[in-house]
Image (cartoon, rainbow, N blue to C red):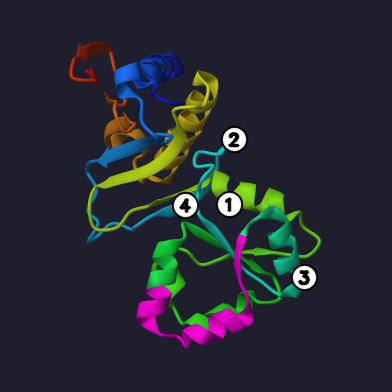
Amino acid sequence: MSKLPTSTVRAQVKDVLEQSAKPENKRNFVETVELQIGLKNYDPQRDKRFSGTIKLPHVPRPRMALCLLGDAADIDRAKLMGLEFMSVEDLKKLNKNKKLVKKLAKKYDAFVASEALIKQIPRLLGPGLSKAGKFPTPVSHSEDLEKKTTEVKSTIKFQLKKVLCLAVAVGHVTMSEDELVANIMLAVNFLVSLLKKNWQNVKSLHIKSTMVVMHAHATPTEFLLIFERELVMVV
């Protein structure tokens, strides 16, 4: 059972959306809503570094930069969708150059690859995409490419590295209150399921947009509104 009440998250999401909607907070881009988690009683050096992915019900980053590494058939499909792509010939031109592969990994948020090519990726590019945590998601010719890209855009990843904090995009400010709440609750509860002591390993939860910040502890009991466009939830 979640120790973070849905009503608590809903109240804070509402405040975040209201703050972002104010004329003085308007931006020329769609603000991403990010979930930040602080952990405790965890030693990254000794404890197992967990990693897990989950598909959210609503796409958190619709403008996510995607690239298809494809064969001729999938490239034709990508062209019809307006999806950026690279052919085998394009990949061969990189010649496993570490700097070029690293540049490619930085250019895109994620990759999909034709099923027939997926096993060739390490041979063509080396370990660069894997090291960046962006190894392509395979797609077969029988699958709907547009649905596959939506699935990739909807999937978030939690991975503990060397520091006791994680951050992941869970939505954007043009989403509805219900959509954001659904994404946040699923993301939080999934992350907690990855932790060795579940909620006992959660120090703090923060929901942050470009202009608004909310701090939420695992069992919040009181709220405090601080001006300068910052929302803080305290225990």
Q: Earlier in the sequence, mark 4 or mark 2?
A: 4
**Location of residue 89 in the rendering, given as x and y in whole percent from the top left corner:** 61, 84
Which of the two discs, 3 and 1, labels the residue nearer the N terminus? 3
Cα separation between marks 2 and 1: 12 Å
Q: Are marks 1 and 4 in contact (CB under 8 Å)?
A: no
Residue type at the position of mark 2: Pro
User: Residue under circle 3?
Assistant: 73
Residue 216 location (% of width, % of height): 29, 25
Give the mark nearest the N terminus, 3 or 2: 2
Disc nearest the viewer among 3 and 2: 3
Q: Which label belongs to residue 162?
A: none
Label 1, secondary structure: give it: helix
Question: What residue lies at 37% left-to-right and 37% top-to-bottom?
Answer: 34
Instruction: Determine the CA span between mark 3 and mark 1.
Output: 20 Å
Inter-mark Cα distance, 3 to 4: 31 Å
| Distance in Å between CA atoms under marks 3 and 2 | 29 Å
Magenta stretch holds residue 5: no
Q: Is residue 219 visible?
A: no
Task: Please give the range of residues in magenta.
Answer: 84-102
Nearer-N-terminus badge (3/4): 4
Viewer-proximal residue among 58 and 205: 58
Residue type of the residue flagged with mark 1: Val
Tag on residue 152? 1
Mark 4 and mark 2: Cα distance apart in space:
16 Å
Q: In the image, what residue occupies the spot 47% across and 83% down? A: 94
Please name the predominant secondary structure of the magenta segment in the image. Answer: helix
Residue identifier under label 4: 52
Select label 3 or label 1 by which is in front. 3
> Which numbered dot is residue 57?
2
- Mark 2 surroundings: few (<14), some (14-19) or many (≥20) residues within 10 A: some
Position of 95 compared to 102: left or right? right
